[in-house]
C-alpha cells in the first residue's frame, strides 16, 4: 500500500510541471546539475532560462546573493591556474578551473559578477598578441565569446568590464572603454547587450586628464566604478548610460600607500589601503556613503596584530636593529566579502600560506583556509621603505557565486 502511494505521489509530481518547479527551486545548484540526467523532462526544465533566473533569485536574502567561494589568481601563477577558497561552512567547492575552454588556452579572469565571469585569453604570435574575450559560468561550464565590431580597437588602448545583476535582469552588458589613438586623454565608450546580442558604438565620448584605472572595474548598484589613485574617479550608470564623477578616499598616513583594494559587498563600495611603514603598517578600510558624497573610515587594522592570534606566524620587529634583522611574513590583502547570509562582511587576507579573515564583530583574526603547498615559491614582491623590506604577494580575488545564470 505504501509503495503504491509513493509511486502515485511521484507520478503526480512528475506530471505537474508547476509543482515540480516549486520543489526543485529549493535545491542547490550542484544538486540540480546532477538531476539533469534524470530524464529529458528534468533536463529541459533545469536548462530553461526562465527557471535558471528564478532559481538564482529564489536563493537571495534581503535582496542580495551570497558568494560560495573566492577564486584567487596569483600574479606569477600560470594562466588558468587558480586557488579556490570556500566561504560557506568551510566545505570544499569544485570549480572547473576553465578546463572547458578547449578553444582558448591561457584564460585569465578580469571580473566576476554574481555567477558570471569576464575572461580573457591571450596567444602570442611572432607579429602580435591575439586577445579573445569570453563570458562564462563556471557552475554550468557554459561560455560565450564576445565578438567585437570589426577592428574598433586597432592600434588603440582599450579596457573591458561587465555589468550583471540576475536579481534585476537575466541579461548582462559588456562595457568597453577605448582610447582614441590620435587624441591624447580622449576616450570613447561602447556597450554590448546580451539581450540584443549587439553593440552600441561611441555612445559616450569623454576626456580625462588623470589616470583612471579602467582595468580595475567594480560593478555595484547598477553602475560600473573604476579605481583611481587621484581625488576623483568615474562611474558609468548602466540604465541611464551616463558618466558621473565620484570622490576617492583621502589617505590617513604619511607613509606610502602601496596597495589599494577596490571592491563591493552587498551593495556597498569598499576601498582598503595598505600602508607600509615600520611598526605601523596597517590596512585602512573605507566605506562609500549611499549618496556617493564621501568615504568613511570604517576600520583600521594593524598588520602586526595578526601575530597575537597566530603565534606560529613569525613577525620579528626590532626597532633598534639593522634592517636585515627585521623579518615580516609575506602577505597580501585579498578582499572584503560576505560569508553567511546575515553576517557582517569580513576582511580576508593571505599570509604565510594561510588565508585568514578579520571578524569585525569579534575583533579578531580567524583561520579560513590553508593554501596548497608551494603556492608562493619565488613569487613575492618586496616593498622597500626606510631600509626595511616588506614582502608582498600580488594577487586578484574574485567572488564566485554558484548558480545557473545563462550566458
Image (tube, rainbow, N blue to C red):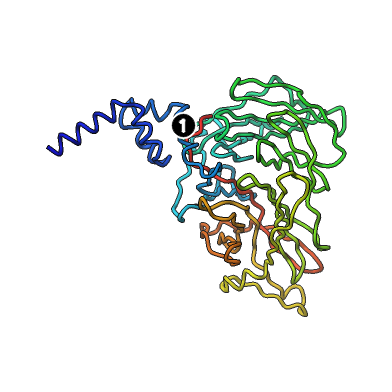
The N terminus is located in which quarter? top left
Q: Which residue lies furthest to the left in this view?
A: 1
In the rendered structure, the answer to whether residue 238 lies left or right of residue 398 reads right
Q: Residue 290's x, y, as percent? A: 70, 45
Q: Which residue is drawn at 63% across and 48% down?
A: 396
Q: Residue 213's x, y, as percent? A: 76, 42
Q: Which residue is drawn at 78% across and 39% down?
A: 234
In the rendered structure, the answer to whether residue 164 lies left or right of residue 233 reads left
| Residue sitting nearer the eye, 99 or 287 | 287
Q: Residue 343's x, y, as percent? A: 54, 55
Residue 374 against residue 108 in the figure, above or below: below
- Quadrant for residue 233, please give it: top right
Secondary structure of residue under mark 1: helix
| Residue sitting nearer the eye, 393 or 242 | 242
Q: Residue 362's x, y, as percent? A: 57, 66
In the rendered structure, the answer to whether residue 273 lies left or right of residue 164 reads right
Q: Mark 1 points at which residue?
A: 52
Amino acid at each position: 500500500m505504501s509503495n503504491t502511494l509513493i509511486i502515485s505521489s511521484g507520478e503526480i509530481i512528475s506530471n505537474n510541471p508547476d509543482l515540480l518547479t516549486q520543489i526543485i527551486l529549493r535545491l542547490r545548484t550542484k544538486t540540480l546539475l546532477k538531476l539533469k540526467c534524470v530524464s529529458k523532462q528534468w533536463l529541459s526544465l533545469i536548462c530553461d532560462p526562465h527557471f535558471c533566473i528564478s532559481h538564482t533569485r529564489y536563493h537571495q536574502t534581503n535582496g542580495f546573493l551570497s558568494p560560495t567561494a573566492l577564486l584567487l589568481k596569483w600574479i606569477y601563477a600560470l594562466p588558468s591556474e587558480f586557488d579556490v577558497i570556500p566561504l560557506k561552512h568551510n566545505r570544499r567547492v569544485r570549480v572547473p578551473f576553465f578546463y572547458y575552454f578547449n578553444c582558448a588556452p591561457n584564460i585569465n579572469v578580469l571580473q566576476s559578477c554574481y555567477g558570471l565571469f569576464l575572461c580573457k585569453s591571450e596567444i602570442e604570435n611572432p607579429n602580435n598578441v591575439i586577445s579573445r574575450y569570453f563570458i562564462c559560468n563556471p557552475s554550468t561550464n557554459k561560455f560565450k565569446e564576445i565578438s567585437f565590431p570589426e577592428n574598433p580597437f586597432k592600434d588603440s588602448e582599450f579596457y573591458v568590464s561587465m555589468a550583471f545583476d540576475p536579481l534585476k535582469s537575466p541579461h548582462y552588458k559588456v562595457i568597453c572603454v577605448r582610447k582614441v589613438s590620435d587624441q591624447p586623454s580622449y576616450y570613447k565608450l561602447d556597450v554590448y547587450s546580451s539581450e540584443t546580442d549587439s553593440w552600441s558604438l561611441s555612445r559616450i565620448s569623454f576626456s580625462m586628464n588623470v589616470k583612471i584605472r579602467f582595468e580595475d572595474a567594480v560593478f555595484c548598484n547598477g553602475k560600473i566604478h573604476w579605481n583611481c589613485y587621484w581625488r576623483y574617479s568615474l562611474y558609468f550608470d548602466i540604465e541611464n548610460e551616463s558618466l558621473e564623477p565620484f570622490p576617492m578616499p583621502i589617505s590617513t598616513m604619511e607613509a606610502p600607500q602601496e596597495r589599494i583594494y577596490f571592491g563591493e559587498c552587498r551593495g556597498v563600495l569598499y576601498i582598503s589601503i595598505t600602508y607600509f611603514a615600520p611598526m605601523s603598517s596597517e590596512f585602512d578600510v573605507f566605506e562609500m556613503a549611499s549618496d556617493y558624497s564621501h568615504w568613511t573610515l570604517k576600520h583600521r587594522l594593524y598588520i602586526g596584530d595578526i601575530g597575537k592570534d597566530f603565534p606560529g606566524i613569525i613577525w620579528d620587529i626590532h626597532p633598534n636593529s639593522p634592517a636585515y634583522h627585521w623579518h615580516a611574513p609575506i602577505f597580501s590583502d585579498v578582499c572584503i566579502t560576505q560569508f553567511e547570509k546575515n553576517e557582517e562582511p569580513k576582511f580576508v587576507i593571505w599570509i604565510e600560506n594561510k588565508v585568514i579573515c578579520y571578524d569585525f564583530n569579534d575583533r579578531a583574526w580567524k583561520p579560513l583556509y590553508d593554501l596548497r603547498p608551494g603556492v608562493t615559491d619565488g613569487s613575492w614582491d618586496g616593498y622597500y621603505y626606510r631600509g626595511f623590506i616588506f614582502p608582498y604577494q600580488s594577487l586578484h580575488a574574485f567572488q564566485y557565486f554558484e548558480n545557473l545564470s545563462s550566458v
